[in-house]
Image: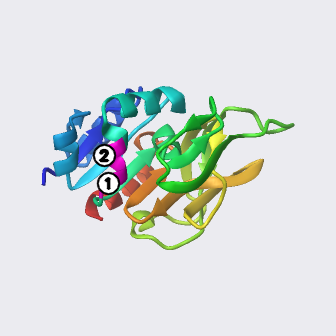
């Protein structure tokens, strides 16, 4: 086993996620190498941008199939969380299918601008070691136009016009819709909790 590895999905937040982990004392390599990913004892899948190009990179590198076989903890961040689901309405993209359900566009309406950008409160839905030390109504930083509905996999939700999943889990697959690397002490705590799972 080789510690924590960041999966290279081509997302623009790879460097900032790596830097956030370095602040916690973890120097995680960024890779698409399947042997390195398979040997890691935990993985982070960052993502910024759109679901379709990230899924294309994961499929072309063979990493998409590998991720479905993994048993170690994996944390998807932002679009990296969204591609854990079955489909995304963003480009009608088939995703990894590790969590049931589909990602939908946030509905724009008076007082609800899309993308959802900025600080918003987390609402704990279930207990989880991933949320240890993160209080109900703590703030996290979001930048996204698509979101997962609240379901049985939801650990924490957020309200922006409607409730959506902010933190999710199914088996060894975890996700954060917000950016822990930009969410100050709350984000650092979530990453530390993931490191200690």
Q: Is residue 68 magenta?
A: yes
Is 29 situated above or below 185? above
Membership of 39 in magenta stretch: no
In the depicted structure, whether residue 23 falls above or below residue 41: above
Q: Which mark is residue 69?
A: 1
Q: Quadrant of the C terminus?
A: bottom left
Q: State which quarter of the image contains the N terminus.
A: bottom left
Q: Tell me the SS state at disc 1.
A: helix
Q: Along the line of sight, which residue is nearer the eye, 99 or 188?
A: 99
User: Neighbour class for label 2 at 10 Å: few (<14), some, many (≥20)?
Assistant: some
Highlighted magenta segment, given as a residue range: 65-70
In this rendered view, identify the residue nearer to me: 186 or 175. 175
Residue 114 appears left or right of 37? right
- Residue at position x 17%, y 42% in the image: 36
Question: Which dot marks residue 172?
Answer: none
Determine contact: label 2, label 1, CB under 8 Å: yes
Residue located at (32% from left, 58% from top)? 73
Number of residues whose C-alpha sits closer than 10 Å to that of mark 1, classed few (under 14), some (14–19) or many (20 or more): few
Residue at image mark 2: 66
Q: Residue at x 47, y 61 (%)?
A: 169
Q: Position of residue 35 (x, y in %)?
A: 16, 42
Report if residue 34 is visible in the image.
yes
- Could you tell me which secondary element the residue under label 2 belongs to? helix
**Label 2 to label 1, Cα distance in Å?**
5 Å
Give the overall secondary structure of the magenta segment.
helix
Q: Residue at x 40, y 31 (%)?
A: 13
Q: Relative to residue 174, is residue 86 drawn left or right?
A: right
């Amino acid at each position: 086993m080789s510690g924590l590895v960041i999966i290279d999905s081509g997302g623009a937040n790879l460097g900032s996620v790596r830097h956030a982990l370095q602040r916690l004392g973890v120097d995680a390599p960024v890779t698409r190498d399947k042997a390195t990913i398979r040997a890691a004892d935990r993985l982070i899948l960052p993502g910024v941008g759109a679901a379709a190009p990230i899924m294309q990179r994961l499929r072309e590198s063979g990493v998409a199939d590998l991720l479905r076989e993994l048993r170690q903890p994996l944390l998807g961040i932002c679009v990296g969380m969204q591609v854990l689901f079955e489909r995304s309405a963003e480009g009608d993209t088939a995703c990894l299918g590790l969590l049931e359900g589909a990602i939908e566009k946030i509905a724009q309406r008076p007082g609800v601008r899309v993308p959802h950008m900025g600080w918003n409160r987390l609402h704990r839905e279930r207990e989880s070691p991933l949320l240890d030390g993160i209080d109900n109504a703590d703030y996290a930083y979001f930048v996204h136009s698509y979101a997962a509905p609240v379901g049985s996999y939801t650990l924490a939700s957020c309200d922006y016009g409607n409730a959506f999943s902010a933190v999710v889990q199914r088996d060894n697959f975890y996700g954060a819709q917000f950016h822990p690397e930009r969410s100050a002490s709350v984000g650092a705590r979530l990453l530390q909790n993931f490191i200690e799972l």
